[in-house]
Image: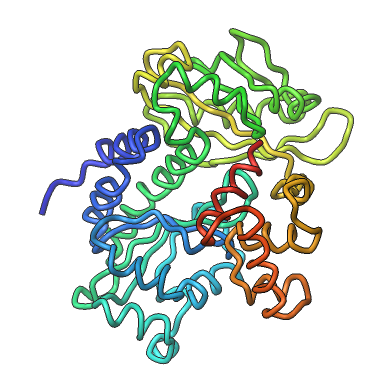
Amino acid sequence: MPRFDPSTLIDACYAAALDPERWPETLDAIADAVGARGGLIVSHDPQRTPVTLHSERLNAVDHDYRIGGWWQFDTRIARVTALGLAPGTIVCDAMYFSTDEKSRDPFIQDLFGRHGLDDLAACLDADPIDGTGLSFSAPRDAARGPFERHELERLQWLGPHATRAFKLTMILGAAQREAGHLAAALDRMRAGIVCLDGQGQVRSVNPAAESLVSGYLVLRPGREPEAAEPADRARFGRFLAEHLPGPAQAHNASILLRRKGGGRPLFVEGLPLHGSEAYRALTRSREGGVILLVRDLLAPAARAIEPLLEPLGLTAAEARVATLIGRGSTPRAAAATLAIGESTVRTHLKAIYAKLDIHRQSELAVLVTRLSSV
């Protein structure tokens, strides 16, 4: 059995964050370390669940899950969501399924059984933009039986880094692989981004963060950030120290800060940057640094784009349907959301495709995604 080398695997996660083409081999490497056939990262948001990031060993499983529609019946996601488990939790089937329940579950018996899989272990996390759940999941060959304790302990080490690195992929985007494009991309983002160097000193703050952190954080170029509320300063200092380069492991991926003088809390998540050339240029630090992702938890999860679609010739009803379908809803789900018939949704879709000169849902998804970021 190959020697377990967590440092190399963790570094591979953050390398994949900047170069997404590395993700399949990185997921396979983590899967090997924890005794699984492959690895995947999946959102628990029903509108994005069909779009999984997976290792090549799971291509056939992903095809059935996504194209075959099995994602709509994912019992594991449903149970984890119902239990309200916290980010960072490691789960496997035995924690929320009895043997009898698994034997009668169509998702596990029909989908997993068809591909020779059985147990699944996962590390839970939260989406960096809207807070919905996501997970790094590792399905295991049925012949190997349940996961062993040491394998779950390895997943406890590696899973949080896989999901954090995936968040960096989401935030930075595949188009920002070179340092020259990276800082400009952060400036254009609506998410609040604060870049710190290896000593924890502020190097860049994008416009969204400047407005979000007012009253919560004091940010001065070349200085460490500190909590504006005196009662939070020591707690935030410890949080920051955990995420800076060094041997210490971060115990808490995120922190809630109070607003000085009162008000709703601000969510701050620490995403470590390892020392690739692009990260060094961004943080001006040889050893990398940290990205602080800041978010207003009560802000709308997704931008309303109907006002952008209506000037393109869509009616108000068609714009609502286009938004839901473009964000991943099925016609049946969109009909339920809008309290209209599924046949009405399909009629609207025909009109939408004709007016926008597109021919399939994937093209509509691209348009809606890009409008959401305008």
Q: Could you say where residue 294 lies in the image, as x and y percent from the top left? A: 66, 34
Q: Quadrant of the N terminus?
A: bottom left
Q: Is residue 268 above or below residue 289?
A: below
Residue found at the far left of this picture = 1
Viewer-closest of 276 and 173? 173
Q: Quadrant of the C terminus?
A: top right
Q: With 29 as the anchor, is 64 left or right in this view?
A: right
The picture quadrant where one finds residue 36 is: bottom left
The picture quadrant where one finds residue 320 is: bottom right
Residue at x 56% of width, y 57% of height: 133
Label count reads: 0
Q: Is residue 109 above or below residue 232?
A: below
Q: With 210 as the anchor, is 277 left or right in this view?
A: left
Q: With 300 as the anchor, is 276 left or right in this view?
A: left
Q: Could you say where residue 104 lies in the image, as x and y percent from the top left? A: 42, 91
Residue at x 70% of width, y 50% of height: 301
Viewer-closest of 76 and 251? 76
Q: Could you say where residue 57 lies in the image, as x and y percent from the top left? A: 23, 61
Residue at x 32% of width, y 45% of height: 23
Q: Is residue 60 above or below residue 225?
A: below
Residue found at the far top of this picture = 222
Q: With 100 as the anchor, is 264 left or right in this view?
A: right
Q: Could you say where residue 259 lies in the image, as x and y percent from the top left? A: 81, 32
Q: How is the image coloured?
A: rainbow
Residue at x 41% of width, y 70% of height: 67
